Structures are given as structure tokens and as C-alpha cells.
């Protein structure tokens, strides 16, 4: 009589990671590139979840609203149905662009949500998305949205300063700042010093 071997959740994840195919079948006619959506990944993963007796959960939360730059966290979790408790997760963080022209706030948060879900899933299942920039593409230019320069006269500068002054040990805040603004080298150096508690009042 054969004895079945029960796989751990990480072993099941490894099987999914090495066999999942989620091709980029969508085309951005403006940017001329192929991409996949979170829905495409979910559709591709469903048969494999049944095969491996697992469930997939996606949770979201707003982790920061400082400096007028809301940041959402998406968590994709693979759960072993054997006990319903054993799981493994991956996280993605994305800033909500409140300056997106032609988009109301629900749409801005919705776009960030879709982006976060897709990248959390991509992180969990090791999906390559190097050519996918649809989350920041506003379909007005193949180069994506135009960044605004951050200066000391910018309306959000003081809030940004206060946000950075709370600390940025791993450089995450500076990275998020550069994702949304153009910052000249001299000012950037000052802001980095502020984030490390090494600067005088700007």
C-alpha cells in the first residue's frame, strides 16, 4: 500500500512558482508594450490552487497618508487548505497618485489597488514584470506621467519635510519621493540629511 506524502505549503508554492504561466496578453496601444493584469494572474492560478489544495487571499491596507502621499500595502497569501492556517505571504507597497489628471479619488485608489495586487501576486509567484508600467501609465504619453519638480516653494514641501523628519532608516521614503517628484541634487541631499536627523531647519 502506497503512502501519500503531504507537501508543505512552501513546497506547494515552489511547484506553483515553477509551473505557473501568466503571459502578458494585454497590449497598451499608446506605450506599445505587453502587460498582464491582476485578473489575468488570478485566472491563471485558479486551476493550480485546486491541484495543490490551497487558497489565495489578498488583503489591502492604507499604511501611510503622510505628506499628501497615501501608501497602500497589498498582501497576497497562499494558504494550505489542509489545516487552513499554514501560509506564506508576499507584500507590495504602492503610492496613490493624487495628481492623476482626469481621475477622481476612487479611481486613483482603484488604480493603486490594482497595481499593488498585481505586484504582490508577482512577488509571491515570482512573475517577471520588468516591461510592465501600466500602473503609472495614464494613457497620455508613452513616457508615462510627467513628474512635478519638488522645490521649497511647493505646496507639499513642508508636509514632506515633516514626513522625512520622522526618520527613513532604509531609504524607503526617499525612494517613494523620487517616484513622484523631480528633486534636484542639492535639495535631495538636504532632504536625505533631514531623514537621517542630520540637518538643520531648511
Image (spheres, rainbow, N blue to C red):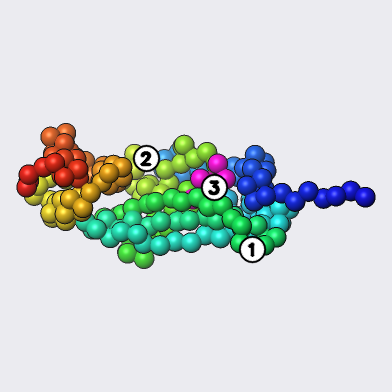
Mark 3 secondary-structure assignment: helix
Q: Which residue is drawn at the image coordinates 27% and 44% (left, top)?
A: 169
Q: Is residue 176 left or right of residue 75?
A: left
**Residue 202 spot, x, y in % from top left:** 7, 46
Mark 2 secondary-structure assignment: loop
Q: Is residue 115 left or right of residue 7?
A: left
Mark 2 vs mark 3, CA separation in Å: 29 Å
Mark 1 secondary-structure assignment: loop
Say if residue 26 shows up in the picture: no
Q: Which residue is drawn at the image coordinates 46% and 41% (left, top)?
A: 132
Residue with the mark numbered 1: 84
**Can you tell which mark lies on residue 185?**
none
**Can you tell which mark lies on residue 142?**
2
Q: Which residues are magenta?
A: 120-126
* Nearer to the camera, 17 or 138: 17
**Residue 60 spot, x, y in % from top left:** 44, 61
**Can you tell which mark lies on residue 124?**
3
Give the mark nearest the N terminus, 1 or 2: 1
Q: Is residue 21 left or right of residue 35?
A: right
Main SS of residues in magenta: helix
Location of residue 151 by image quarter: top left
Q: Is residue 95 left or right of residue 159?
A: right
Amino acid at each position: 500500500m502506497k503512502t501519500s506524502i503531504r507537501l508543505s505549503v512552501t513546497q506547494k508554492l515552489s511547484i506553483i512558482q515553477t509551473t505557473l504561466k501568466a503571459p502578458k496578453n494585454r497590449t497598451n496601444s499608446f506605450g506599445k508594450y505587453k502587460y498582464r493584469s491582476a485578473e489575468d494572474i488570478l485566472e491563471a492560478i485558479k486551476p493550480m490552487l485546486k491541484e495543490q489544495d490551497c487558497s489565495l487571499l489578498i488583503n489591502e491596507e492604507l499604511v501611510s497618508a503622510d505628506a499628501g502621499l497615501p501608501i497602500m500595502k497589498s498582501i497576497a497569501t497562499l494558504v494550505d487548505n489542509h489545516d487552513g492556517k499554514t501560509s506564506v505571504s508576499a507584500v507590495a507597497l504602492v503610492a496613490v497618485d493624487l495628481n492623476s489628471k482626469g481621475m477622481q479619488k476612487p479611481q486613483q485608489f482603484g488604480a493603486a489597488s490594482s497595481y499593488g495586487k498585481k505586484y504582490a501576486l508577482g512577488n509571491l509567484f515570482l512573475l517577471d514584470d520588468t516591461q510592465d508600467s501600466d500602473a503609472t501609465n495614464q494613457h497620455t504619453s508613452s513616457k508615462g506621467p510627467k513628474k512635478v519638480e519638488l522645490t521649497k516653494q511647493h505646496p507639499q514641501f513642508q508636509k514632506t519635510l515633516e514626513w522625512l523628519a520622522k526618520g527613513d532608516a532604509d531609504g524607503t521614503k526617499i525612494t517613494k519621493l523620487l517616484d513622484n517628484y523631480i528633486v534636484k541634487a542639492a535639495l535631495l541631499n538636504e532632504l536625505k540629511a533631514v531623514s537621517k536627523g542630520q540637518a538643520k531647519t531648511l
